[in-house]
Image (tube, rainbow, N blue to C red):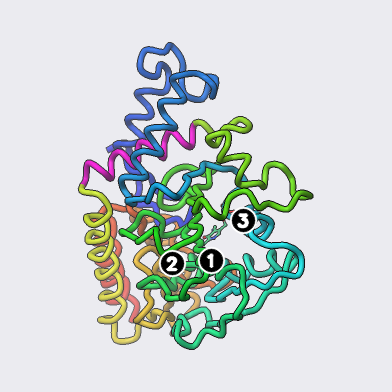
Amino acid sequence: PHGRVYNFSAGPAILPVDVLERAQADLINWQGSGMSIMEMSHRGKEFESVIQKAEADLRQLLNIPKNYKVLFLQGGASTQFSMIPLNLTKQGDVVDYVITGAWSKKAKEEADKYCKVNVAAKGDNKSVPAPSTWKLSPDSKYVHYCDNETIGGVEFKSTPDVGDRVLISDMSSNFISKPIDVAKYGIIYAGAQKNVGPAGVTIVIVRDDLIGHCRPEAPVMLDYKIHVDNDSMYNTPPCWSIYICGLVFEKLLKAGGLTAMQKLNEQKAQILYDAIASSNGFYNSPVDPAVKSLMNVPFTIPSSADLEKAFIKEAEKAGMLQLKGHRSVGGMRASIYNAMPLEGVQKLATFMKEFQAKNQ
Ligand code: PMP
């Protein structure tokens, strides 16, 4: 319906059709208010109810303990790369970063500006060094890692054990794709535009004791405490994006929560990894099988770059878009976030088999 395609974009990414339909219905006149969410004051009771429900539903979905605050911020996940060291360290402090791909590397490079970064472990963009081998510094203020590297398709399968250190995770591309134990983390953050909602809002879950220590010279917008004290409304929040995220949270709760999502996501990813594994080498997944992402599935056709180009073009004709790999690595990448239906993945797997049969 609606002439929609299967959109495998890594982000901004596919959203559930029923959420878009609901937003469409609400667009001109939200719940009898006579205006859309985009047009109303963020200080009014209408928007207040939207952001409060979004937070309450997210807390329920992730079972977020009471001693954590939930923030809806701007500036993308990239702003968290600076906000984290500015709030958790003083100049000269040591922090640990684990590098498993392009995004954790970027986070580390930003932290370099503010404190002494120890690279506790560095992967090869295809695998995750075993947490038992990480060389954590004895006095580090926190340990930062990326739970799912969107470009490489490398995903942690469990929370790394860092003892009593403060663990911080960039979950931009696998946030709310599966249940996680929030209590094991100091901070979890995620740009919304992949697995949650539209671009423009970044969700930050931060433990109480980490709030209130921002460097005085930091911009006011980068102080967690300012946003906590003002319920994410120190300044004008990204109202529309928060509203859509709220619709997604509500939908996921009704659909059985994150345990149900994980099951479906595992099923979807398995279909694609099976299609690659059963191709007798026609397709290749560069990723260590132990850490293959459920969200972003990169693959190549090792025999020919021209065939890769043809694959992307023909898939597009068949209604499967945005399958081109990240410009830094080439090949293909299928991003199959929560909102990608099972049928989309099945269609891609069938297409892969047919393309191979024609071109081998
Ligand atoms: N971290 C990860 C894992 C990402 O995938 C991205 C976006 N591709 C970012 C951080 C940066 O996010 P943003 O564009 O919201 O700053």
Magenta-drawn stretch, dominant element (helix, strand or loop): helix
Is residue 259 placed above or below 116 in the rendered structure? above
Q: Is residue 280 magenta?
A: no
Q: Quadrant of ligand 1?
A: bottom right
Q: Position of residue 314 (x, y in %)?
A: 39, 62
Viewer-closest of 29 and 135: 135
Report whether the residue tagged 1 is closer than 8 Å to ligand 1.
no
Q: Dot 2 corresponds to which residue?
A: 333
Q: Position of residue 255 (x, y in %)?
A: 21, 45
Instruction: Specify the label residue 326 is tagged with.
Output: 1
Q: Is residue 254 magenta?
A: yes
Which badge, 2 or 3, comes first in the chain's sequence?
A: 3
Q: Nearer the viewer, mark 2 or mark 3?
A: 3
Which badge, 1 or 2, comes first in the chain's sequence?
A: 1
Viewer-closest of 25 and 175: 175
Q: Position of residue 243 (x, y in %)?
A: 43, 33
> Three-letter amino acid code at disc 2?
Arg
Q: Dot 3 corresponds to which residue?
A: 78
Which secondary structure, mark 3?
helix
Q: What is the span of residues highlighted in magenta in the rendered image? A: 240-255
